[in-house]
Image: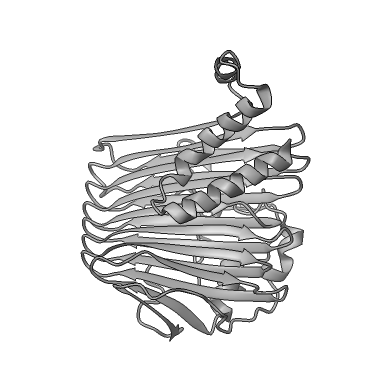
Amino acid sequence: MSTPVQTEQHGLTEHSHGGWATAPVQTRSERFASTAHDEFPEVTGREAIWKFSPVDRLRGLIDGELDGSPYAVLYPEAAGTTVEWVDRSHELVGTAGTPEDRAAANAWTSFEKALHIRLDGEAETLTVTRTGLGDAPRAAHTLITAAAGATGLIVLDSQGDARLTENLEIVLEADANITVVSVQEWDDTALHLASQFARIGHGATLTHIIVSLGGSVVRVNPSAHLAEEGAEAELYGVYFADAGQHLEQQVYVHHDAPHTRSRVTYKGALNGEGAHTVWIGDVLIGRDATGTDTYEQNRNLVLSDGTRADSIPNLEIETGDIEGAGHASATGRFDDEQLFYLQARGIPEDEARRLVVLGFLSEIVQKIGEPVLEARLHEALEAELQAAR
């Protein structure tokens, strides 16, 4: 009779009721991914990627039947850009990434056509607006591609009511330099789940900005794959959660090639009972990503009692030959010194608080580079602060 082979590691012996293969995934890049909804296990709310989310409010988007047909979009003519609906079998669909959660896979399984936005040369600023998607569960897929050497600014502006789960792919060819701004200014009852994938080519630069102000539950998870040498990514986010509102961002930056650079800065404010924000930042420096330069940070400003801000930065390094890497996270109330400085110069306390908050959040808004949109967002932040008084 043969004797079972024992698996040993540092004096430990494998138990008969479980093996080393059952250990949880430790490396961010090894997370399961699939475009098929049914290949993901059912969501319980205890999973690492769902444990901060109000899963029960999102069941219809995670598992329900979704309308994946094209919807109305508004956009002006802009030189150097084309906008068209393409079939889901288009060769570029799937180039930037693959869903890593059941809701994103549900959207991928359900969409009929993708909205394709193409940039060539020195493209003019293009704003694509969608509004009034309604209260029926819907799937969507958007594809943004930038030709080699292309420059430009794309704004994806979401308004009105929605029950939406979607995927956005951004593909930059060599030496492209573009900015993509995703604005979530939904009505108060809207539910929105989004996965946003970017693949950044040789010498290309992506500036990616998330603005989340409206909606009941808004969860936008951007990921940037610095796939070729010299790729750069700057990822920014600004959000303001009020009473009962859940705003979430799970950010992933994968340095996969030599001499790549990334900066991640997200800032948020919370006011009102039950206001909840979530920021999780994962940065992976792969074994071939020598010369990497990366830094991520999240800052939250608490304006009242009864709020909750979860902020978790993670950094994984697989090579020792890097330029630099770091992360930071902070959540707190007003800086008393700033308030004292303003009040000492005759500014009333309420006005001083308003100026501090606007200055804190406006740093991100000013990264957009489109004056009309920046002014609109400043007004929206002013309205949030007025309601918070």
Q: Where residue 328 appears, x then y in whole percent?
A: 47, 32
- Residue 366 vertical placement versus 116 (above, below): above
In this rendered view, identify the residue nearer to me: 66 or 118: 118
Q: Residue at x 53, y 76 (%)?
A: 73
Report whether residue 366 is seen.
Answer: yes
Horizontal placement of 146 versus 188: left or right? left
* Front residue of 4 and 45: 45
Image x and y of residue 333, in percent: 64, 26
In depth, the one of 32 and 213 nearer the eye is 213
What percent of the width, then of the height, locates residue 28?
A: 45, 51
Q: Residue furthest top?
A: 344
Compared across the picture, whether 222 is left or right of 134 comes to left
The quadrant of the rendering that contains the C terminus is: top right
Relative to 62, say whether 246 is above or below: above
In this view, 337 is above or below 235: above
On the question of residue 97 being in view, the answer is no
Q: Residue at the spot x=50%, y=42% of the render? A: 266
> Residue at 48% across / 36% down in the picture?
11
Q: Residue 216 at x, y = what percent?
A: 71, 56
How many badges with numbers are in the image?
A: 0
Residue situated furthest front in the rendering: 346
Instruction: Using the image as rendered, state which of residue 84 and residue 299 is in the foreground.
Output: 84
Q: Residue at x 53, y 61 (%)?
A: 1
Instruction: Please say which color scheme the image uses.
Output: one colour
- Residue 320: image quadrant is top left
